[in-house]
Amino acid sequence: MTKRVLTLSWVVLLLLLSWALPVLADEVHLANGDRLTGEIVRMEKGSLHLTTTYAEEVKLKWQEVVCITSEQELTFRLRNGEIWIGRANCPASGRIQIVGDRIGESAELSLEEIEAINPSPPPPAVTYRGNIAGGGNITKGNTDEAAAHLSAGFEARSKRHRFTLGGKYNYGETDGEITTRNALGRIKYDFFVWKGLYTLAQARFERDDFQDLNLRSTMGLGLGYQIIDTKRTSLFAEAGVSYFNEDFTEAEDKSYPSARESMGFEVDIVRDRIKFFHLHEFYYSLKESKSYFISSEQGFRLLLFRNFFAKFQMDFSYNSQPAAGRERADITYIGSLGYEFEF
């Protein structure tokens, strides 16, 4: 009986102590005299983020903050590049004292000397992204048909460099006879010289059995500008010169120097769900005014779940001087499923 009473007494005492002791929290003093308590999450780009029990995360202008205190250790990045880790005290308005418990040192600074608190880790030096997609159909009955499509793309990007690869392959047959067989490959390197401005080197290789085309190749140099580059929208334009060569199976081969123009963009029509894309290249002969070649691809990419997507695309090409007996324009409609990655 005595032991039970003692145990109950200790429980009551602990409850009373937990109620009596103050709850540890960070505190932010504002220029208008307000004081907010909670947990300081971070301060970057002139905004202080504070989580509270009554309003979840609050975003405050750093210029309106006159003092902060913290019960937790914070990481401070100063404008001179120094890094301090410690608790924050408030010696005076507009001042901060950083107490480093680990190394036993402290520093008193002006709030203007603080560039960031708990800054986000820097982005990786190089980022990678890519996708692979495939589609096809098989029909059996009055007509036996089969078709397949495969495409892939890859991009490696750093602050000054961008390297891209891309390719696609189409195949089809009807009643045992091949009706479609073509392939395309691209490679491009961009060097950013100033903000969105970059120099580029590019090459393109294409084969199409039904255009009598053994190999169409282009290699060139130029300038480009990345007008918009965000997660939701991307837009670029390029211009330069290229060597254009067409090797036909039966027709006479031809080659010439050409001017090259290209533009591409992607935009979210429905945020993080449906994206519209377009890419075209235009080659104009600097030797013969009647010779030019246009290639474009455009369509929609629909995110299904996680990184899997469905793609609906139209490819168009126009050759002003095709091989004898071939059409100038080609149009292909493609539906496929794919997977995209980024790291």
Image (spheres, rainbow, N blue to C red):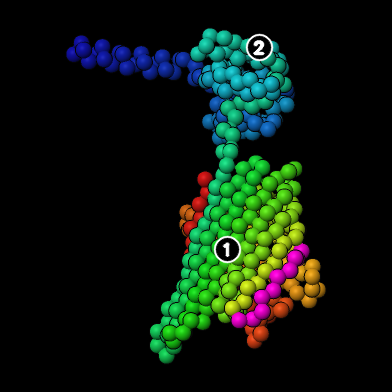
Residue 32 position in % (x across, y down): 73, 23
Quadrant assignment, res 241: bottom right
- Residue at position x 69%, y 27% from top? 62
Query: What stretch of residues is rendered in magenta?
Result: 250-259
Q: Residue at x 52, y 69 (%)?
A: 169
Residue that badge 1 annotates: 185
Q: Which residue is mark 2?
A: 108
Residue placed at 55% from the left, 54% from the top?
154
Q: Secondary structure at mark 1?
A: strand
- As shown in the figure, which amino acid type bears the numbered disc 2? Glu
Q: Nearer the viewer, residue 230 or 99?
A: 230
Magenta highlight on residue 41: no
Name the magenta segment's main secondary structure.
strand
State the residue lying farthest toward the top: 104
If the image is split into quadrants, where does the N terminus sit?
top left
x 50%, y 60%: residue: 132
